[in-house]
Each structure stands twice: as structure tokens, then as C-alpha cells.
Image: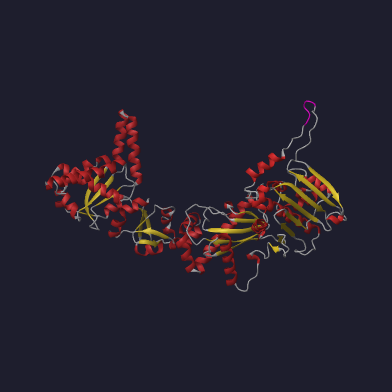
Amino acid sequence: MTLPHTPASPAGADRTFQVDLRGLVDLLSHHLYSSPRVYLRELLQNAVDALTARHGLEPGAPADAFGIRLYADGSVVRVEDDGVGLTEADVHTFLATIGRSSKRADQVAEQRADFIGQFGIGLLSCFLVADEIHVVSRSARTPDAPAVEWRGRGDGSYTVRTLPAAARPRPGTTVTLTPRADAGEWTRPAQVHALARHFGSLLRHPVTFDDGTGGPGAAVNPEPAPWARTYPTPGARSRALAAYGEEVFGFTPLDTIDLDLPVVGLKGIACVLPDAVPAGRRHGHRVHVKGMLLSEQAEEILPEWAFFVRCVLDAESLRPTASRESLYEDDTLAAVRDALAERLRAWIARTAASDPDLLGRFLQTHHLAVKSLAVHDDEILRMLLPWLPFETTDGHATLDEFARTHRTVLVTASVEEFRQVAAIAAAAGLGVVNGGYTYDRELVHRLPEIRPEVSVADLDPGTLTAHLDPVDRETELAAAAYLALARDALAVFDCDVALRTFQPASAPALLLDSREARHERTRSQLAREQQGGVWGDILGHLRQEAPRAQLILNQLNPLVRTAVTIDEPELARTSAEALYGQAAMLSRRPLRPAESSLINRSFLDLLAHALRKDS
């Protein structure tokens, strides 16, 4: 609140900060709270904490002896509780001092963990929707305590007066707001009821809502959390949890996973998503603290690899941030995250052991998430690696299936390398796995840990070339002149040319060129151009030693058999360029500008040659 003006103080004397309440409310609305709707959450939170303190005073009272009542008729919003209440001294101490919370009072300091709010600024959120806050309270701590009225206004002023006990016969607190005209979106009866359900559906104290139409109050939280209810059969429980997950998240879960950490008082469920999500995309989770909704987008509660689930949790010991809209990163949160990760691992292990159909559906949908986990988790690796799908020269297959027919498994370093060699390797009987996708190459190399009889090696151009059949000496000699012209034409691409036979015969040429080799050639070329002189000559020599691309011509292909007989030098060079361009396109890697230019030029040159021949 704005403090009264004080006379000038002597030089060096201590002064007191002046607080502009309107400026502070603006700061809260734009930087602390995500929306004006939080005013109702703060009022509910204060009421719940007051009830918690009341139960501390009267531990023998039934759990539902005290409750919270909401009222909204379009002209006022009222929240009434049967909590511990405030004395006149409490009102002056806590309601009129920004930043001080009644939960910090000495008599309840040791019970601070029992309360949701810990920052003492929640009541200010009411100024987001109203210009005045009217509070009437009666303390349960002091016998025969009078009722106390406090009115706080947006200009920073407030009044306090004592009322007769009859003004509030029972202990507790009533907060009444008269909404501003621009706050109707958040204070209409239907909206107040919806917000109460949104924030308070899992609260342990009974909460009712009255819209002023004269009907019976509607229960905001008529039932306990779904995981806390009793069910006639395990199947009924499973269906109820799935229905709750669909109600909350809008999808039918592939399965639900119970999450129960008694040490921190955490309970809830994880809903397995029925559809795949991009790697690394983290979903927000619904986190409640002591029944009050804290956040719908709490990403930090689970590890990054667990992007195949969305959770609804209710915890006792997690610490909210100042806005009470996210979780404070501390040792407790880190321990909870690790424990929840272990629950998800246990579910995967249990499913693998007892429900192969569910496991198959799960892996088909979320294999990428499981791969990311298997990279860092040896138990999951041993359990699921044989069942994970990979792209191979035998099509999409599990490593278990692939290892049955290929005792030597070759793995590429990139997707484009796999696409270059897949058809040729399959025809040659080689077992090649595409290692270009996230985690795949690393995981395939760990296959011998589970299948010791299988060996894994990286595929390089030399390995594949060694499995291609050489042509006979007579054919090689006959094609020597053409091959020399082809090498000269493709020297600009650091590409060698060789003649082999391989299946399928429909493939005229195969271009073998790894990404690492291209990068090395590009790097050395740039270095040579920048250095010049003696250093340029030395780097030029080193460049000649860099891995070169290989264009393998297929002698079984009719087009190649015709091309190698060309004795016209320019036409031979053009045909070699065309074969290179076609093989580069079939590799499905990005074309360099020079390669695109070569493809266009060779096509036009061949077309011009054909037209000249016809004329």
C-alpha cells in the first residue's frame, strides 16, 4: 500500500520506501501472473490455507467439517471459507503489508510446508479484476473474537473496523469483489464456476458454487481424484483412468501409468500418447500442489526423453515459484523427476514382459523416444533393442529379425549414404542398416552386447566396392580410353570412375561419396585458395590425398555398354557427366550448384548431339 507522506529527514537518516500500488498491480498483471483469471486461484488458495490452519487447531474435526463456498451473480464475486480467520491485529499485520503472509506467522511457521501460498501477495491479484477488496473475518484462535472488516482500494488506501460478532457468527473469512466493467470476461457466473473447476477440481476440502439463481449450490469437486477412488475391478479402474486422461488432454491414451511417490506425497497418472511426436518436443504436464492446479505446462517435471506421455500429478512437497504457475527448480524437484523416470522405465519393462501386443503398438508409435532412452539406459537397451524398428536393406525390420539373416551388420553414417547404396547392397546380399537417424547408428553398434554372434561395422565405399564384381580384363582394356576421358571430365568433382558389374542391371551407375569426404575436400580446397604460394602447393598435395568420390559404372546396363564404346572425346565426356548427374540425383543428397549446372549442360549437349545426328 502507498505509505503516507513523511516530513523531510536529516541527512543520512534511514527512509522508508514509498509503494505505488497501482504500479505494483500493473507489474503483477504483466510480468508475474499469466492472466487475470488467477485472482480466483489466489482466493481459493488463501481459503484452503485457512482451512489447513483451522484443522491444525481442531485436529479432531472431520475432514469435511469445514469448506469453501463461492458465489457469483454478475455483480459480485464472493469466496467464503470456514478457516482459521483473522483478528484485528492480524488484519493490520498481514492484509495491509505487502509481501507479508499470514502463513509466516510464528505460531504456524513450523507448519509452512502444509500451505500452498508462501509469498503473501496473492490478495493483490484481486485488483486485476476489481478496484476494491472487501474482507470480513473472524478468528478461530481467540474465543469470542469479534468480526473484523477490511476494505482495501486500488489507490493504496484501506480502512479497518470491528463488527459485532453477529456480523459473522462462525469463524472464517469472506472476500467480496465488485468487478470492474472491463473484467466481465473473468467474473461472469459461468466463468467463475469454470475457473473454480479448473483450479480446484482436486482440492481435498469441499467447494461449492452458487450462481445466485436460488438453486442448490453445485459441487466444484464432487469426487476425489480418479486415482484415489475405489473400483470393483482392475479393468474398471483402467477404463476410468483412461476416460479421465481423455477428458483432461483430449485423446484416448494408449495406456495409463500409475505414478505414486509416497515420500513426497505425489500421486497421479501418465497417459501414453496414441500418436508419435517429434523428437525432443516436450509436452506440458498438469501439476497440482495439494490439490490446487499449479500449471498445465510444467515441462520440468519429467526428463526430456519422456515426451511420449502427458501427466496429471498432485504433490505435497513440490515448491511453486512466486507466481504459483510453475515449479521451483531445486533438489526435491530433481529427485522427483528421477523417481518418475524410474516409474516410466518400470512400465516399459512390465509391458515388455507381460503384454507383447501393447509393447508392439507402443514401439511402433514411440520408437524414437525409446531409442533416446536406450542410448543412456543399459537395462532398456538389453530389453528392447532387439525389438526396435530400423530402416534396413531388408525393409523396415527389428534388429532381432535382421540379425537372423545377417551375421555381419553394416551401418551407414547418414541417411543419404544409405539411400546411395541400399539397392546395390541388397542385390549383393549385404545387410545394411540406415544409421543416419537420431540414435540409430549408436544403437546398432551396441547390438553385439545383446547378440554376441553378430558383428557390426561402419559401411564405407571400399566395403561396398569390394562386393561388386570386376569386369574381365578384355572388357576393362576396351573401356580404358572412355574411363580416362570420364575421369578427366569429373576431376573437378574429385571423382574417380571405375567399371564393375552389379545388380540391379537397370542401375547404370552408383555414386559413392560420404558426407565427411565432401566436407574434407571442400575444407582443403578453401584452405588452398586462401593460402596460395608454397603453402597452397602443400595443401594441394594434401587435398589429393583426401578421400575421393567414386562413380561406379555398371557393365550390365545397356546404356553403359554403349557409352564405353564412344570414341568421340567430347561426346564421351558429356555422357560421363550425364551418368554422374543421374547418379547424384539418385543418391537424393542436396546437389551442389556446380552439379546442377553440369546436369543441365550435359542434357542440352546430348540433345544437341542427337539433333545434329538426325539432321
Vertical order, 356 against 481 (above or below): below
Tell me if 272 is positioned left or right of 48 in this view. left
Q: Residue at x 63, y 43 (%)?
A: 30
Residue 552 in the image: state x and y as whole percent: 24, 50
**Please, which residue is most extreme toward the left here?**
615
**At 43% from the left edge and 62% from the top edge, which residue is drawn?**
386
Does 524 sit above or below residue 463?
A: above
Residue 38 to residue 361: above or below? above
Q: Position of residue 100 (x, y in %)?
A: 75, 45
Q: What secondary structure characterizes most of the magenta part?
A: loop
Could you say where residue 520 lies in the image, as x and y percent from the top left?
Answer: 34, 41
Which quadrant of the view contains residue 17? top right
> Residue at the top extreme?
11
Q: Which residues are magenta?
A: 10-14
Is residue 543 highlighted in magenta?
no
The structure's colour scheme is secondary structure
Q: In this orientation, does residue 78 appear?
A: yes
Q: Quadrant of the N terminus?
A: top right
In depth, the one of 232 and 96 nearer the eye is 96
Task: Classify residue 237 by image quadrant.
Answer: bottom right
Q: Nearer the viewer, residue 614 or 484?
A: 614
Residue 566 appears at what percent x and percent y? Answer: 14, 47
Residue 483 visible from this viewpoint: no
Most distant residue in the bottom direction = 232
Q: Residue drawn 16% across and 42% down?
A: 570
| Count of numbered marks | 0
